[in-house]
Amino acid sequence: MKGLKLVLLLLLLINISVSGGRGGQAPTTDQDTKTAQFIDSVYQDPDNLAWQHEFDKLLTAASDSQTIFEANTLFLLVPGWLYQTHGRETGSDMAAVRAALDPLNACYAFVDVEENGTIELNALVIAEAIKNTYPNPVVLVSASKGSAEVAAALAHLAEHDLKHVKAWLSVGGTLRGTPLADIMLTRRWCWISRLILSHDHLGLEGLQSLSSARRKLAFERLQLPSHILKIALVPVPFRADLTQDARFGYKRLRSQGPNDGLALLHDQVFVDGITLLAVGSDHYFKAIDVTAAVHALLTLITERIPS
């Protein structure tokens, strides 16, 4: 990890020298205004607002809750990018989610995808895992890049393969990829991306498959059965909320719109689903009580899906 931190420091120094710390980006106040406008637009939907009120109420009452999940409901967990190499730092290994599920009598399975694999190849692994869970009622829970992989997996499956899938919770999901991947693959930045990944003996394939140019069209073509409840938990940071890990990506993306330090906020939303907001958290959810959030989210979902 010390070697990786040195590489990241080098990247930061290069960035400062090239951009002068500004790079022609919009002022912080303008970006925070756009973030506030995004929040307002989400809450214009009465369903989103009702879910958010219930979610917030459950968050505060989580320590007193006695919810025990039905044993036949399986939560299928799909991790994020580089979950084996850096999952402990980024949360992409979903270890905190699994730790929160253990005392709740919740039945879950972890999909062991290739940590730097392409979205297309990992989708095949996930599709097989979904089919193998039949006939148990299934709730899909995906994080970050894992959400793009779940989307690609569902595109592979026929409707009869999905009749037992009751809901899909996408947490900070890069459903439509991220322009940050496109930026980091340009001639200016690609050598740095290659340097950072090669430190862990990894290639560019995972990053390349996250390209928004590559993912947006695929996601917009995805048609899911109407019985699957879709919920997106979107982290919404203001400038003052950013952790160190999110600042570089936030700066690169802010000219394109409100973002969480890795992906644009509007790219994480289901058009025909529910959007919940984690205001004050960036992509790495360091500002949220994961145990309380997991309990609240899964309670909300299981109360609303048919048994």
Image: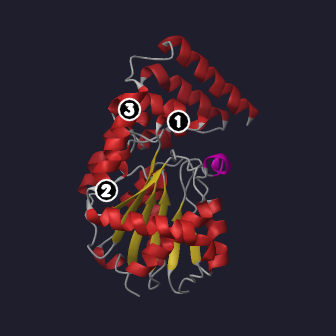
Q: Secondary structure at mark 1?
A: helix
Residue 284 lies in the magenta stretch: no
The quarter of the rendered structure image containing the N terminus is top right
Answer yes or no: is residue 288 visible.
yes
* Image: magenta residue range: 84-90
Residue under label 2, please give it.
43
Q: Given contact means CB atoms under 8 Å apart, are the residues at marks 1 and 3 in contact?
A: no
Left or right: 34, with 104 as reference point: left
Q: CA distance from mark 1 to mark 3?
A: 11 Å
Q: Earlier in the sequence, mark 1 or mark 3?
A: 3
Give percent across and percent down for residue 93.
Answer: 61, 56
Q: Residue at x 57, y 74 (%)?
A: 108
Q: Which residue is mark 1?
A: 240
Residue ranking furthest to the right = 2
Can you give x and y, in whole percent of width and height, for residue 20 in the image? 50, 12
Kindly identify the amino acid type of the residue bearing the numbered disc 1. Answer: Ala
In this picture, residue 205 sits left or right of residue 213: right
Mark before the other along the chain sequence, 1 or 2: 2
Vertical arrangement, residue 158 with respect to residue 150, above or below: below
Q: Residues within 10 Å of mark 3 (few under 14, many from 20)?
A: many
State the image coordinates of residue 158 (x, y, percent, origin top left).
30, 72
| Left or right position of 17 against 277 | right
